[in-house]
Structures are given as C-alpha cells and as structure tokens.
Amino acid sequence: MKAFARLLDRLAFLSSRNAKLALLAAYFRETPDPDRGIALAALTGDLQLRTAKPKLIRDLVTERVDPELFGWSYDFVGDLAETAALIWPTGERNEAAVPGLAAAVDQLNRAHKDSAAKLVAEWLDVMDPAERWALLKLITGALRVGVSARLARTALADYGAVEVGAIEEVWHALTPPYAELFAWLDGRGPLPETRATPTFRPLMLANPLDEAELAKMQAADYRAEWKWDGIRVQLVAVRDAQGARVRRVYSRTGDDISTAFPDVVEALDFEAVLDGELLVVRDGQAAPFADLQQRLGRKRVSAKMLQSQPAHVRLYDMLFDGEEDLRALPLDARRGRLEHWYGAADRPRLDLSPLLDFESWEELADLRAGAREAGIEGLMLKRADSPYLAGRPKGPWFKWKRDPLLVDAVLMYAQRGHGKRSSFYSDYTFGCWRRREGRDELVPVGKAYFGFTDEELGQLDRWVRAHTTQRFGPVREVEQALVFEVAFDAVQRSTRHKSGIAMRFPRISRIRWDKPAAEADWLPTLEAMIEGARG
C-alpha cells in the first residue's frame, strides 16, 4: 500500500506526460504481482469493489468526527478521500497491520457490507495519512492524478518495450490483475490470445475540423458521410473455441452494452467485427437522440420499449470479415468489402451509412448547412486511403459538426470543482428570464464547467467570491449580473428540469462582461428552438 500511495502522490504533482510515463514504468518494474495489476486496474478505471463504496467513507468519518466539521472541511478541500484521510483521528502507526494493495482489495471483495466497514476503519487507524488517502481513493474510484487509461497503457508499452497498439488489441479480453499481460511484457509468456474471444478493438476516432484547414486539403482525397446523432458502437460476432457463436455490442469506450440492446444482438447472425452508429429508427428514419437515451444504461428492456424504441445500427466500417483482419486496408477497400458483405444476405436492424456525393468543399458545406433540420450532428470526412488506426491519429479523419445553438444566459449559482479545480468556483448554473405571475424571474436552464481559459477561470472565481449573496454548502448563489454566451448542441423538453427544457452539451462560449443581465435571453427563445427543430 505504501508504494501505491507514493505513486499516487507523485503523479498528482507531476505535469509532464513523459515524467508520468517514466514513473509508471518504474512502478510496474519494481512492484510484484498481483499488486501492480491491481494498481493498473485502479488507474484505468477497471477496478471493481463489490461492497466498499463512497457512502461507507462518509458513514465511517462521521462516526469519528463531528459531522458539521467534516462538512465544512469537505467543502474547503473539495475531495472526499483527501478530506477523510486528513481529518481521520491519528492512531498509532502499525506497518505490520497495513495490508498490501492486492490483499486489501481481495479482503474487501470477500467481505459483507458491515465487515467491510470494520476492515476499512481498522486499516485507517494504523495507516499514515498518505496510505489512508490511497486506500480511500481506491474506494471512491476517482483517482484524479492526471493519468488516463490510454496513458497507463502507454506506460505499460514503454515498460515492456512493445507497441501500445498491441496492448490495446488485447486489453478488453483481460481482467485484473493482468497476470498474462505482465508475463508477456516480462518475456515469460506469449501474447494473450483473443481470436476466439468477442473482444473490443479500439475505435478509430476523428479530430474536430478547423475550417481553415480545408484550403490545404483536396476534396477528391476524402470521402464524406453524415455524422448520425446516436452513439458509436462496435458489433462483434465470433465463434468461440467450442464453435459456438458469441455476440457483443460495445460502446466506443469498450463497455459491453449488449443487455440493453437484445434486439441488435439477435441480429448478429454472422462472423464479423463492424463499426457503426446505434440509433432508434422508425420507418427508415433516425429518431432524435432522446429516444435512444431512454434505452441506454438499462440492464433489462421491456417488450413495450423494444417495440416503441426499436434499435438499429447504421454501419460505417468493417474491421474483420470472419477471421480476416481488414484494418490495414485503405478505407475505399474496406468500404467495398462492407458493401459486398451487406448485399450478400438479409441484414435486419442494420443498414449502410451512405457516402455523400460532392466535388468541392463549397458543395459539401451546403449539404452540412441542412444537418440540423435533418436531425443530423454534422459530417465526417475520411481520407480514401486511410487504414483503420486505433485512437485519434491526426489527419485521416475529421468531424465537421453542425454549428452550435447560442443563447445569452445569466449566472445564478457557482460550485467548486474537483481535483485541480477544487479551490476554484468552476461549475456554473445559468438561467434565462421568464414572466411568472406578473414579474420577471430567472429560471435555471443549464450547467457548464468548461469553455473558458485558465485566465478566465481565475477572473470568474474572483467575481463569484465578490458577488456571493447566499451559500448552500459548496454552492454559492450570486448576484444576477453576469451574462454568459452559452453554446449547446441541442435542446429538448424535459419533465426533470424546473425550466421544462434540457440542453445537450452546454459550454461557456463567451463571457459577456459587456452585456447587462436584463438583456439576456428569455425562456421562450429556447422553446422556439425546440419547435424549430421539430419543424
């Protein structure tokens, strides 16, 4: 546990990517199995603790410390694990009673809820603050030390002197503590076998298009298709070692969402790996994203929902045809294989995303202008000769999204952020005006925490502190005086929000220091946007 605590502490204060990679590689080199595998699972977000949850921490701390004092401290520090580790009454340090990392996880997963709480309390009593912090970070699942899953796998590649793509290829077929993976990286075993496993292959992603770049690009070198308003998925249908067909639907991050879409799984009566967009489709027309959203995250789907919200996948690409890996082929060749495969049999709940016919960027821009009215997110541009590469390589693929909607809204509430932003008021709730019972009032319409620079964050934080009117725990109500220009992708009706609407992907586009709050937009402006989208 001490080595893991030291790793997290050093990572939290490092800003250099290369320094983090070197530190992680050294940890993997110096730490034995299975501790290093458990640490890797924690860093990549793949560690599962069955009974130990964040509520357990709150309950334990408020048994030992005055709840009001804990609340004030948490408000000031902004991080549950750090607050609990620092405020926990100091006991006598007993290194022999501190479990190793893997041993602690194993004991917690075998313990019932009550005995898990007892274990954690006993460990916290004999740990130093750094070890307490590391243990509690494991339980909250939010390390916030500036290490993404991709960075952790890159550090593994550096440690084993292999290509990160080789690790990405097998990653989703592995489970903690990754003994087979470390055996291969150490030269003690073969690369883990995944051919007969319905494993996820990392998707190829696009970069946002800077329209100034179009002048440097040749239209004839690219293929264009619509960017559909659903979620990106990978369909995997293979035969296992016993010859049985195994079928999976994965999200773009590799999460298995098959249970929420049994209608799609049933249609995977082939052997291939396909890339596409998951939608709700009725009579050949893609429904709004809100319809699909009703099915996301469900463990079970009722027969009524299967009927009312029929799932469908619009295919973009083909990664494997049977056991043949097509990813090294150019896009045009893969598209040809996909079209031939699709036309060779009836493919229920699947269709092809059509390629758009254009000869110039101006012609394509005209097509993009109609994306919002058609309920489409925008365009995808893909080089005709591009292989299918994991991650987000610069150059081959671009996303040219439709222009955002804009509204001027008034800042109403501010809340502290987390991690590096825990000392700043960086999460902002904003509202628009409406007339009710003869008077004008602001009603919240959205919340955003990005879209501004670090310098602007400092200015906003100072403004919030100087214009606070009331406090509600970590939230401050502020004077109704500061206007944000808010950009968002879409807006829809909502029964869960006081305003009756919900914004999709809101962000702060501009701080309107120059605009009086009385001149901000009214709620009917947003309602008109909803009606316009329907029209």
Image (cartoon, grey):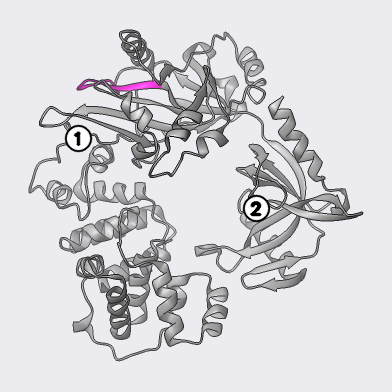
The rendered magenta stretch, by its main secondary structure, is classed as strand
Q: Camera-side residue: 338 or 295? A: 295
**Position above or below: 446 against 333:** below
Q: State the SS at label 1.
A: loop
Q: Quadrant of the C terminus?
A: top right
**Residue found farthest to the left:** 188
Q: In which image quadrant can residue 203 be found?
A: top left
What's the magenta region? Answer: 316-327
Q: Mark 2 vs mark 1: which is more N-terminal?
A: 1
Q: Is residue 63 left or right of residue 344?
A: right
Number of residues whose C-alpha sits closer than 10 Å to that of mark 2, classed few (under 14), some (14–19) or many (20 or more): many
Task: Inspect this view and state whether residue 350 appears.
Answer: yes
Q: Position of residue 33 (x, y in %)?
A: 15, 60
The amino acid beneath tag 1 is: Thr
Q: Which numbered tag is attached to residue 447?
A: 2
Q: Residue furthest right?
A: 438
Residue at position x 33%, y 8% from top? 340
- Which quadrant of the figure contains the N terminus? bottom left
Q: Residue at x 27, y 56 (%)?
A: 40
Q: Which quadrant of the structure image shows residue 135?
A: bottom left
Residue at the farthest bottom position:
92
Instruction: Decide if residue 50 is on the left or right side of residue 177.
Output: right
Q: Is residue 87 visible?
A: no
Badge 1, how many Cα within 10 Å: few under 14, some, many 20+? some
Label 2–label 1 contact, CB within 8 A: no
Tell me what residue is drawn at x 35 percent, y 49 percent: 149
In reply to whether residue 200 is colored magenta, the answer given is: no
